[in-house]
Image (spheres, rainbow, N blue to C red):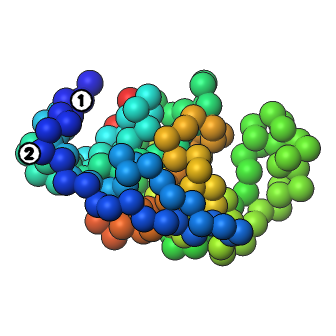
Amino acid sequence: MFAAMSCGTFVVPAAAHQTRNSTFKVDPKFEPQSVPYFAHPPGTIVVDTGAHFLYLVESFGKARRYGIGVGKAGLSLKGEAIVERKAKWPSWRPTSNMIRRNPRKYAKYANGVPGGSGNPLGSRALYLYRNGRDTMYRIHGTTEPSSIGRSVSNGCVRMINAHVEDLFERVPLGTRVIIL
């Protein structure tokens, strides 16, 4: 488990985030902020799916915390992975499992969706691998910022586009990711 404390946090003021058709104001607790953190070595990403937070451990005792949206029950990746690929404005294609679970919603996208403002992966994606193989799970932006703080996705870790852009610039390839 991780040890995060609520004392001594630095909170960035809540900002309005653009969606395709409107502006959404995220709960301030899900805005990026510096928090005390002592559980993992610097450079590690820790995804706490239950609490809906992603931590980038910056130094011993300190992490940058972001709010996230995660997979519905049973759809989230658990354990460890490595960031082996990063992409700006990535293209997206639903997995075979997504199409099988909900063909009405996903079959029409079977050939993929090019990168851009309407793409479900948003502005950036970090691709998670295990033993050199793509897990098909991503840390990525979203066109649905209201999903932050909720368990509603098909398993990937969603972030507000501006937040995933910040994380993208801070994280090199080879970064260890721990998903709780």
Tag 2: amino acid: Phe
Tag 1: amino acid: Phe
Reading the image, the residue beneath label 2 is 60
Q: Residue at x 32, y 61 (%)?
A: 13
Can you say whether 101 is above or below 83 in the image?
A: above
Q: Is residue 38 left or right of residue 161?
A: left
Q: Residues within 10 Å of mark 2 (few under 14, many from 20)?
A: some
Q: Residue at x 57, y 60 (%)?
A: 24
Q: Nearer the viewer, residue 64 or 131?
A: 64
Q: Position of residue 51 (x, y in %)?
A: 40, 32
Q: Quadrant of residue 32?
A: bottom left
Q: Position of residue 99 (x, y in %)?
A: 82, 42
Please tell me whether mark 2 sits on a helix, a strand or a loop: loop
Q: Residues within 10 Å of mark 1 (few under 14, many from 20)?
A: few
Q: CA distance from mark 1 to mark 2?
A: 13 Å
Reading the image, the residue beneath label 1 is 2
Query: Where's the C terminus, which quadrant?
Result: top left
Q: Nearer the viewer, residue 151 or 98?
A: 151
